[in-house]
Amino acid sequence: MTKFFQSSFFAQELFKNIPGTLSFKDSWYSLVFYWVFFIFIFISSFLIYLYRVPIRLNYKRSKKIIGMSKKTFWMLVGWIIMFFIILRSIMIIFIEKYGVIDYKIDDLDGTVKSKLWEIIPLHFCRIMLLFISISLIINKIKFVKFYAYLAVWAAIVAVAIPGIYRHSGFDNWWYWDYLFAHGFIILFTVLLWNVSGVRFSFKDTLYTFAVSLAIGLVMFAINYASYKIAFAKFPNDPNERLKYISNYWYLGLDDYNEFAWIFGPLSKWPIHIVTWTILGYTLIILSIIISSFMSKFKVVRTKEGNFKLISVKSKYWKFYKASFRLKKVSKTNN
């Protein structure tokens, strides 16, 4: 087992000196595939949204999916997602225990590259996977409206600014874990939003604001607590400390936060929680504006059976504007 997890496939490839590495940033093939993969995800997500009407109609007409009731199917999907979430945590434990780990500080950005604290999947995109899984398991698909916007934006940011090891490529587990997790979040969240036909109201916006702030405060507290506990438990062993100091939601202390530099003083601890909160709220508002515009365009099936792109008034904006009055309006805002 030790030999298996010490292979380059599981190595946290911070440095070049790992044999057989098909590097992510220093070789074109891993990098090109990375962008081809996510361009495919973005195009597929866009097409799912454009074809939302025939997709939703077909979903409503279907009583079963792959021979299962819809409830059973989505519950099974939820448990499969949960299985892979748990499997990743187990893999990290084995990699940390038996693998080749170098707890050095990255010379380029000055941050620590350790993953042990991620055995608890509370990082932003990982917790979004948890939300997806749980909402399917408890048969509450429409809960997607509370996390969809932040989940998609978080995954887009993760794609644009990869939190992947500099030399993790085709032959590395971390590379594929990163691709599949973030690609799945984008594509599957868009799919759930469209098949469920959710409505997003002003009240839902306030709920999303409140819940995201509450979770952010919890992550801020966990990160600080992990820092204090690690220093108390390993006062003279910096290598051990690095394993346990978390950076959930990028709200960790500066020395352990790879995004501490991005907005200068505004992204430093502890003010970064205010900055990220404002940014998150801004992205939700921007999502509402984008959704209002995009809902004007959709593909429908004509009487002849052909697909046609049409432009209509935005039902999304009509519903959202009416929701300020807290009255019930049409059943869909798409």
Image (tube, rainbow, N blue to C red):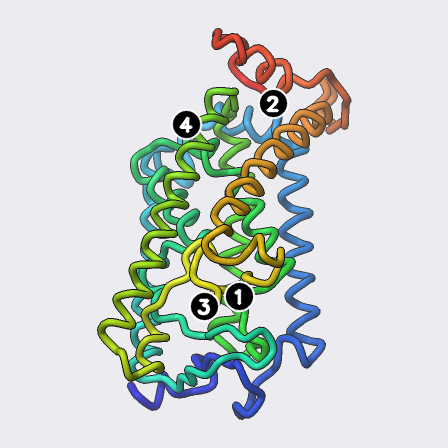
- Is label 3 or label 2 in front? 3
Tell me how far mark 1 sits from mark 2, CA to CA. 38 Å
**Which amino acid is tagged 3?**
Tyr
> Could you say where residue 71 lies in the image, as x and y percent from the top left?
34, 33
* For discs 2 and 4, the disc positioned in front in the rendered view: 2
- Circles 1 and 4: CB distance less than 8 Å? no
SS for callout 4: loop
| Circle 2: element type | loop
Residues tagged 2 and 4 counted as in contact (Cβ below 8 A): no
Dot 3 crowding, Cα within 10 Å, few <14, some 14–19, many 20+: many
Callout 3: SS? helix
- Amino acid type indicated by mark 1: Glu
Q: Which residue is mark 1?
A: 258
> Which of 109/328 is in front?
109
Residue 132 % position (x, y): 41, 43
**Residue at the image position 33 percent from the left and 33 percent from the top:** 139
Q: Is residue 220 left or right of residue 151?
A: left
The CA span between labels 1 and 4 is: 47 Å
Residue type, mark 2 in image: Asn
Residue placed under numbered mark 3 in the picture: 256
Q: Which residue is mark 2?
A: 334
Q: Nearer the viewer, mark 1 or mark 4?
A: 1
Q: Is residue 266 above or below residue 21?
A: above
Q: CA distance from mark 2 to mark 4?
A: 22 Å
Q: Residue furthest left?
A: 233
State which tag comes first along the sequence, 4 or 3: 4
- Between the residue at mark 4 and the residue at mark 3, the CA separation in whole angstroms equals 50 Å
* Amino acid type shown at disc 4: Lys
Q: Quadrant of the C terminus?
A: top right
Callout 1: helix, strand or loop?
A: loop
Residue 63 tag number = 4
